[in-house]
Amino acid sequence: MRYLLSLLLLCTCLVTASQLQAAEPNFVIIFCDDLGYGDLACFGHPTIRTPNLDRMAAQGQKWTNFYVGASVCTPSRAALLTGRLPVRSGMMSAKRRVLFPNSKGGLPASELTIAEMLKTKDYATAAIGKWHLGHLPQYLPTKHGFDSYWGIPYSNDMDAVKGFPGYKQTAQKDPNYAATIEQYQVPIIQNETVVEKPANQRTITQRYTDKTMEFITQNQDKPFFVYLAHSLPHIPLFAGKRHLGKSRRGIFGDVIEEIDSGVGQILKTLEDLKLAENTLVVFTSDNGPWLLFDTHGGSAGLLREGKGSTFEGGMREPTIFWWPGKIAPKIEMEIGATMDLLPTFCSLAGVPIPKDRVIDGHDLSPLLLGKTDKSPRKQVYYWRSEKLYAIRIGPWKAHFITEGCYGIGPKREVHEIPELYNLDHDPSEKYNVAKLHPDVVARLTKIAQAHIQSIEPVENQLAK
């Protein structure tokens, strides 16, 4: 009798543990750098092979109207991790648009990240890859809720050594040009210690994948969150031996196909460990393609402009959600944003949203899980250099200020009458219909003015 009672208690404990794990899903974010809307096969690229991302999109949800919080690295990453517009945290600047190796600022300790929120539920957390939210010790991932960190502290083209040929000029002469490791002295940091300098960027993509799989394997018995932020396809371009020279798209394609291979390895790890049905995987990018670098930059597909701009090519990103058995496969045309990931993950994990600050993200979980067919996100605010350049409400987008990509124009222009585009009809922003819809222009202008008034001044971290 005592044996049967012990067995019953053991089974009860096992069921409870299983139910607890089911109530707290795992989360994996795979975040690329400068990947364009048109750079994946499943988003229309004709010569880049991405079979793993194609499978992920077919089995999951491909979001066609998904946005980032800014069109460049640092503010975009701040938006994703905090669920807030970067202008609210001081992570957006008109003087220096991103952090540099000589910057003294970073993501303030007062900001709450996805990792910090999930730690309240005892999640294991890891940041792997490019950080770019402050390289000084007080700003590193381990100070923002991550148990561990392995990656580069800022962009892979920083710490450039003088005397080497300019990357742009060399790449223009040789479309398949790959830089040497010695040209860029960017370090790899493990937690808070430099463990490699210069980083071997030829092997770095696979090593990011390996670190991710290792973390998942080590934490398979508890809920976990992995933030994998690839350094590439930000220039300079590097590909490992297995992928170099294999893509019809040249070295840029080699880089994307290696990232895709890593996605496949991560998904297989989740499947082999029987974790796939309890793990939400999100794949997206920090901003659009760096068009200045010709074939070494990516493509925004049918979208206008790219990195640095507030046209669609700068801030609308190729995005895929994958959660077998939990989310129904479909092409999702509702609006979403990286800022929505924090409240979505918190909702799924049962973590209360903080009420002591403005959270610009929305909980997408009812839409993901098929409980509704409408997104809670109705608007997108396009900030650049501490100014609101544009706003989207439903299908309508009004541009108050327009400016092109880094280094290639067109020049900044303030519009007395805002430009207006219907993005459902005209995603390429070719046809300004402001004269046909003055009422829409007036409505969006009023909403934009109210939004600007909601932004409270804070210390600028990028200008330090």
Image: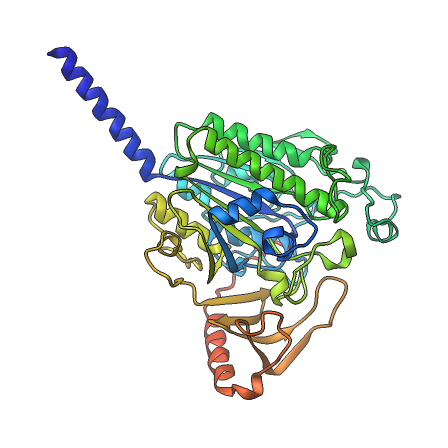
Q: Is residue 63 above or below residue 244?
A: below
- The image shows residue 202 at horizontal and vertical percentages of 73, 35
**Colour basis:** rainbow
Vertical order, 35 against 258 (above or below)? below
| Location of residue 254 in the rendering, given as x and y in whole percent from the top left corner | 72, 43
Count the labels in the image: 0
Q: Nearer the viewer, residue 261 or 199?
A: 261
Q: Position of residue 327 (x, y in %)?
A: 40, 48
Q: Nearer the viewer, residue 414 or 88?
A: 414
Residue at 61% x, 80% y is: 432
Q: Residue furthest left?
A: 1
Q: Is residue 382 visible?
A: yes
In the image, taking residue 110 as reference, residue 463 lies left or right, namely right
Position of residue 238 in the picture relative to residue 371 (left or right): right
* In the rendered image, the vertical position of residue 419 relative to residue 209, given as above or below: below
Q: Nearer the viewer, residue 384 or 201?
A: 201
Q: Quadrant of the N terminus?
A: top left
Question: Can residue 386 be seen here?
Answer: no
